[in-house]
Amino acid sequence: MATRAGFSMVELAVTVAIIGLLAAIGIPSWTQAQHRAKRAEVPGNVEGIRVAELAYYATFDTFVAEPAWYPADLTGSESDKQLRAWPELSAAGGFSQLGWAPFGSVRAAYSIPDGDEDSFEVQAVSDVDGDGDTALYWCTEAAACGWETGDENVF
C-alpha cells in the first residue's frame, strides 16, 4: 500500500487563497493605523500652542498671530511623511513670542493665522501618506477643535 506524502494542488491553492484574502484585508488596515499614529502629534501640539496663547493673553492682553507655517509650508513637493526639525526658537516667528516649541521633530506644519486682541485660531496641516491631500486640524481659544480633510483619512 502506497502512502501519500505532501499536499495536493487543491490544498495548496486553498491555502494560498486564504493567505491572499487575509493580506488584502490586513494591509490597508495596517497602513491606516500607521497614518493615524503619525498624525497623533497634531492635537497635542495644537493644544500646547493654544495653552501658550492663553498664557500670553493673560500677561499681555492680546493674542499672537503667526501666519507663516512652521517648520515649512507643505504645499508643493515637500510632504511630512518624514520628520522635520523645528527651527531655532529665535527663528520661529510668533512661536518664539509665545515661548512654544515642540519636543523633537514634527510631521505637521503649524500656524496661527488669526490672532488679534479678541481671538485666535491655531492650525496644523498634515500629509502623512504623502499623496498631496492634506488634513487640517484647527482649534480656537474656546477649545472648539476639529479636522478638515481632503482625501486624507484621519479617523
Image (cartoon, rainbow, N blue to C red):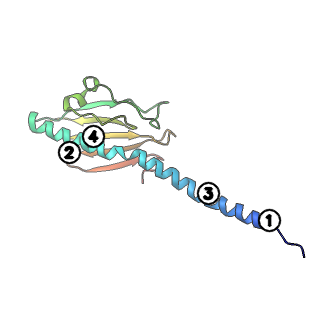
Q: In this view, does 56 lie to the left or right of 103?
A: left
Q: Is mark 1 on a helix, strand or loop?
A: loop
Q: Which mark is residue 141?
A: 2
Disc 2 element: loop
Q: Residue 104 location in percent, x, y?
A: 34, 35
Q: How far apart are marks 3 and 2 (CA)?
A: 43 Å
Disc 3 designates what residue? Answer: 24
Q: In which quarter of the image is the N terminus?
A: bottom right
Q: Which residue is drawn at 47% across and 31% down?
A: 78
Name the element at disc 4: strand
Comparing labels 3 and 1, the label whose residue is closer to the camera: 1
Q: Residue furthest top?
A: 91
- Work out which quarter of the rendered image holds the C terminus and state it: bottom left
24 in relation to 87, above or below: below
Residue 39 picture quarter = top left
Question: x, y percentage for residue 69?
Answer: 34, 31
Q: Is residue 69 above or below residue 45?
A: above
Q: Name the residue under label 4.
A: 122
Query: Which numbered disc, 4 or 3, marks the residue closer to the eye?
Result: 3
Q: Residue furthest bottom?
A: 1
Q: Earlier in the sequence, mark 4 or mark 3?
A: 3
Mark 1 is surrounded, within 10 Å at the Cα level, by few (under 14), some (14 to 19) or many (20 or more) other residues, namely few
Q: Distance between the residues labelled 3 and 1?
A: 27 Å
Q: Position of residue 93 (x, y in %)?
A: 26, 26
Residue occupying the point 19% across, 29% down: 97
Q: Which of marks 3 and 2 is nearer the N terminus?
A: 3
Residue 127 lies left or right of residue 123; in this view the side is: right
